[in-house]
Image (cartoon, rainbow, N blue to C red):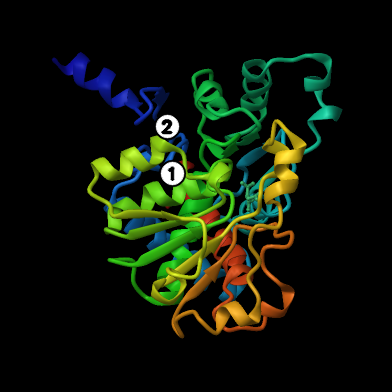
Amino acid sequence: MAATIRASAKNSRTSTGVRLPLGERGDGRFYGQHILAVSQFTRRDLDYIFAVAGEMHNMVERVGAIDLLKGKILANLFYESSTRTASSFTAAMERLGGSVIPINEVRYSSVSKGESLPDTVRTLQCYSDVIVLRHPETGAAVTAARYLHKPLINAGDGTGEHPTQALLDLFTIQSELGRLHGLTVTMLGDLKYGRTVHSLARLLRLFGAKLNYVSPAILRMPSTVVEELKQAGIEQHEYESLDAVLPKSDVLYVTRVQKERFENPSDYDLVKNAYSITPATMTRAKKEMVLMHPLPRVTEIDMAVDEDPRAAYFRQMEYGLYVRMALLAMVLGKA
Ligand code: NCD
């Protein structure tokens, strides 16, 4: 009996079914866990993550950095381009006193010699305590995690998920509007290929949101996501024009048309300028609305909108730093 208890205490099964060894401080909810998809999170988890992110915000404003993760190393492995996600994970690790192995140009690593993803991540776990992975294939993070006994954080897998972005998006909504319940959230643009909206819509199901999807017909929200939310009793509506839903929206979440994911470049040309938010658009929106965008933007939000107090996309990036600090501290057992 005692042996059974000892054996189960030594290993924790993650929500993805991957067994990870527990270390000297295996007491936190996310200690040693992979962050792969938003389905991992409960409402209580989100409250906890946002409370820790709030602490991180206060700490950065007060002292800038602490040595909570001193001696810990993050491997930042990016097979796709990134400005915000890669640099915010780096900043997060460094503000917590840790250091980073940056591999954001995989063509200069052994990947260019033909090394497989499992071998590359197994190499990096020899030198680091946590791995952040961005990869063009849907499901790559789940595959990579199977080969690891150290935590892996999915920083975007193809058109699949972008769970840390969804967490920071939700944290932004809470910080800007002061509430998360019963909101009308309108998602606009490339809902087919945009992984951020796949994750955010799934996370919003926990808060009884009403979701409007506005996109060109060829870029509709995937039926898998719509069906999942339908099963959870979430009200969802699809449109091709923003006009009818804009005045009722508490959040307008705009996305870039994901040029790099189109099989046929002429399809991209047909939809690349489908929407553009301008100051005139904003006159028809609620006074208390939050305008969000995961960035980078191309033409879908006019720069003249940036000065509008409802334009939250630059603040959204900053909230991302605190959420990623919270996640790193949590998976490394220090929160
Ligand atoms: C997004 C992504 O990579 O999915 N960017 C980000 O992480 N902030 C959105 C995009 O590339 O359009």
User: Residue placed at 67% from the left, 29% from the top?
Assistant: 127
Horizontal side, residue 73 vs residue 192: left or right: right
Is residue 142 positioned above or below 41 on the image?
A: above
Residue 176: percent from left, percent from top: 46, 75
Quarter occupied by residue 213 = bottom left
Q: Is mark 2 within 8 Å of ligand 1?
A: no
Residue type marked 1: Gly
Instruction: State whether residue 334 appears in this view.
Output: no
Between discs 1 and 2, the one toward the N terminus: 2
Residue type marked 2: Gly
In depth, the one of 229 and 99 nearer the eye is: 229
> What secondary structure is found at the residue carrying circle 1?
loop
Quarter occupied by residue 129 = top right
> What secondary structure is found at the residue carrying circle 2?
loop
User: Residue placed at 63% from the left, 71% from the top?
Assistant: 277
User: Residue placed at 60% from the left, 68% from the top?
Assistant: 313
Instruction: State whether residue 237 appears in this view.
Output: yes
**Marks 1 and 2 in Cβ contact (< 8 Å):** yes
- The residues tagged by marks 1 and 2 sit, at their Cα atoms, a distance apart of 9 Å
Is residue 113 positioned above or below 264 on the image?
A: above
Horizontal side, residue 254 vs residue 181: left or right: right
- Residue 333 badge: 1
Pointer 2: residues within 10 angstroms few (<14), some, or many (20+)? few
Give the residue pinned by disc 2: 23
In depth, the one of 2 and 167 nearer the eye is: 167
User: Residue placed at 70% from the left, 31% from the top?
Assistant: 263
Is residue 141 positioned above or below 65 on the image?
A: above
Q: Residue furthest right?
A: 108
Horizontal side, residue 167 vs residue 308: left or right: left
